[in-house]
Amino acid sequence: HQHIDTVLTLGKLTAATSEAFGENAHHYDDIEMLIAHAETLLSPNVTILVKGSRSAKMERIVNALKEKEPLLNEHNETI
């Protein structure tokens, strides 16, 4: 994880990912808690990758972050 500063995971099946990443990983069972943490990471020089299965409905995280920072699009480019 040379270029990854922080990992946030959601749900039972991803707890091992957080454990494997180490110190700067945070695991959540509640999406609202994950979103609240992710919002604290928003800044112009930060790239956030949201990855998950369609069944996890990860677009909820993307939509929440876009509401918080409406000047950013899906590719972290200023509109």
Image (cartoon, grey):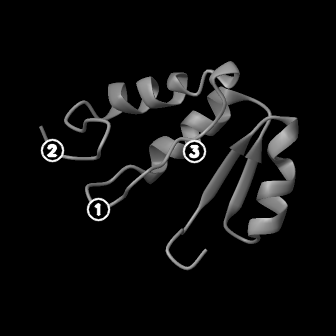
Q: Secondary structure at mark 1?
A: loop
Amino acid beneath label 2: Thr
**Can you give x and y, in whole percent of width and height, for residue 45 in the image?**
29, 62
Amino acid beneath label 1: Asn
Q: Closer to us: mark 3 or mark 2? A: 2
Categorize mark 1 by other alpha carbons within 10 Å: few (<14), some (14-19), many (20+).
few
Which residue is rendered at x = 19% and y = 35% of the image? 71
Residue that badge 3 annotates: 37
- Nearest to the observer: residue 7 or residue 33: 7
When the figure is inspected, residue 5 is found, relative to residue 68, above or below; the finding is below
Residue that badge 2 annotates: 78
Alpha-carbon distance for marks 3 and 2? 22 Å
Which residue is rendered at x = 63% and y = 38% of the image? 34
Amino acid beneath label 3: His
Alpha-carbon distance for marks 1 and 2? 11 Å
Residue that badge 1 annotates: 45
